[in-house]
């Protein structure tokens, strides 16, 4: 069968190949093919390997010489707060001088400041700001992004945010998956009667379901935000409606959100800087993926999640960027991957698993993306590096040479060639 596109002369092709969730020690198990090719047809991978690709070549086939560079599956950023208005550089000085993140929120700033701006922002303003961030992420090799709502904290703005994500998914080459996060903070107007806000979120879940605007539901389970009991109440309703669920868990205080996530069958539990040993053991061999966000530890100058302990205990780990205006204002996913290496002490192979097949699994997308496999989507990154180790060692820059999404080149020679 003829290919539409062939990438040839690949120095080394790296891909996970085991069935996810890939736990602990198996995360190092990566397939490496030298002098490889990938043949693509109708946006999907037709074949790949180190044998001859000539059989797939016709006069119409587009050819891309990878010039001995390396190729990996497109990176999946499985935790972002992509759609929001404004920025919070005024808080940066406070954070730097030691004011805790939760104290800023308690004083009515932080998330609530972004809520105020997002409520006021037009659909177009939100769309353009998020569009530009998405393009920046794509430049770093990200081909799928999860985007949470949670800056409305009332149904109109939550719907506006989710509709922006939906339109971005339609217009932008990057795949955008939406998560409803009405339980991101308690809005100012409910500060004295938080229980009514929980009721509101639970009622709004029905609306989100009816409008089909989200593929998952998330809750910020943290001191001063939502307790374990409140998180459970909201997520049990979400589950009853058929939503996959996830939790911002044990980020600052060890409340036990990770353990709750396993009990409820969450697809992922995210952050986990303060996770207990008991909850690490609960996560071991489970279907709940530990989604670690080292960029947040870096920016907030906090401790890092105990990734090595999790991997040694057979937890399935993924890594995400957490792009947001308050605790991780960067779209540089390759820097996040460097932090996973330098601070979480993960190996290059573990990190590759953690940014491809494991996030694909917890986003329920592993049948389509997350590895280089026949029949999967041709979402690929060609990196200007001699081997996988190099991209973690040479940090702070983008190693991306070309990016392909759905069989189309979207970044060519470091330039964005297709934005929509
Ligand atoms: O806007 O501060 N942690 N949510 C939970 C965030 C960070 C986003 C923000
Ligand atoms: Zn988050």
Image: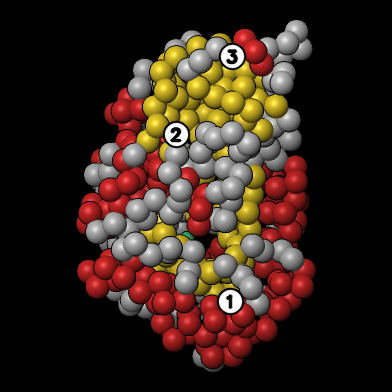
Mark 1–mark 3 distance (CA, rounded to whole Å): 46 Å
Q: Residue at x 43, y 63 (%)?
A: 287
Q: Which residue is mark 3?
A: 53
- Name which of mark 2 and mark 1 comes first in the sequence: 2
Query: Whole-percent x and y of residue 379?
Result: 59, 34
Q: Residue at x 66, y 16 (%)?
A: 56
Q: Which mark is residue 239?
A: 1
Does the rendering let one see residue 101? no
Residue 119 higher or lower than 186, as above or below: above
Give the residue furthest to the top. Answer: 59
Q: Quadrant of residue 211 in the image?
A: bottom right
Badges 2 and 3: C-beta atoms under 8 Å apart? Answer: no
Mark 2–mark 1 distance (CA, rounded to whole Å): 33 Å
Q: Nearer the viewer, residue 195 or 287?
A: 287
Q: Nearer the viewer, residue 259 or 324?
A: 259
**Does label 2 point to a residue whose CB lies under 8 Å from ligand 2?**
no
Q: Nearer the viewer, residue 231 or 331?
A: 231
Residue 308 higher or lower than 187, as above or below: above
């Amino acid at each position: 069968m003829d290919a539409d596109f062939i990438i040839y002369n690949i120095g080394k092709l790296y891909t996970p190949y085991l069935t996810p969730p890939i736990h602990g020690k198996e995360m190092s198990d990566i397939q490496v093919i030298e002098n490889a090719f990938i043949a693509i047809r109708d946006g999907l991978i037709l074949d790949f390997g180190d044998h001859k690709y000539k059989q797939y070549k016709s006069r119409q086939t587009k050819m891309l010489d990878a010039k001995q560079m390396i190729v990996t599956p497109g990176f999946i950023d499985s935790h972002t707060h992509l759609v929001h208005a404004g920025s919070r550089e005024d808080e940066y000085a406070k954070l730097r001088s030691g004011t805790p993140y939760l104290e800023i929120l308690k004083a009515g700033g932080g998330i609530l400041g972004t809520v105020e701006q997002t409520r006021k922002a037009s659909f177009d303003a939100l769309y353009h700001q998020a569009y530009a961030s998405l393009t920046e992420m794509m430049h770093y090799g990200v081909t799928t992004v999860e985007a949470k709502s949670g800056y409305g904290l009332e149904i109109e703005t939550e719907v506006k945010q989710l509709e922006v994500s939906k339109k971005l998914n339609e217009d932008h080459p990057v795949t955008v998956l939406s998560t409803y996060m009405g339980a991101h903070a308690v809005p100012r107007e409910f500060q004295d009667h938080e229980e009514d806000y929980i009721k509101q979120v639970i009622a709004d879940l029905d609306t989100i379901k009816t409008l089909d605007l989200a593929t998952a539901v998330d809750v910020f389970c943290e001191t001063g935000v939502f307790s374990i009991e409140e998180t459970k109440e909201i997520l049990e309703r979400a589950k009853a409606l058929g939503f996959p669920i996830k939790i911002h868990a044990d980020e600052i205080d060890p409340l036990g959100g990770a353990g709750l996530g396993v009990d409820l069958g969450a697809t992922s539990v995210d952050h986990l800087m303060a996770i207990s040993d008991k909850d690490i053991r609960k996560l071991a061999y489970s279907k709940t993926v530990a989604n670690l966000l080292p960029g947040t530890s870096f920016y907030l100058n906090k401790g890092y999640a105990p990734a090595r302990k999790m991997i040694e205990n057979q937890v399935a780990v993924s890594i995400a960027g957490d792009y947001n205006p308050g605790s991780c204002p960067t779209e540089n996913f390759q820097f996040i991957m460097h932090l996973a290496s330098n601070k979480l002490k993960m190996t290059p192979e573990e990190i590759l698993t953690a940014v491809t097949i494991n996030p694909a699994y917890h986003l329920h997308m592993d049948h389509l993306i997350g590895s280089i496999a026949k029949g999967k989507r041709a979402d690929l990154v060609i990196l200007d590096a001699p081997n996988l180790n190099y991209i973690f060692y040479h940090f702070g820059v983008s190693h991306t040479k070309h990016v392909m999404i759905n069989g189309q080149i979207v970044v060519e020679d470091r330039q964005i060639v297709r934005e929509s």
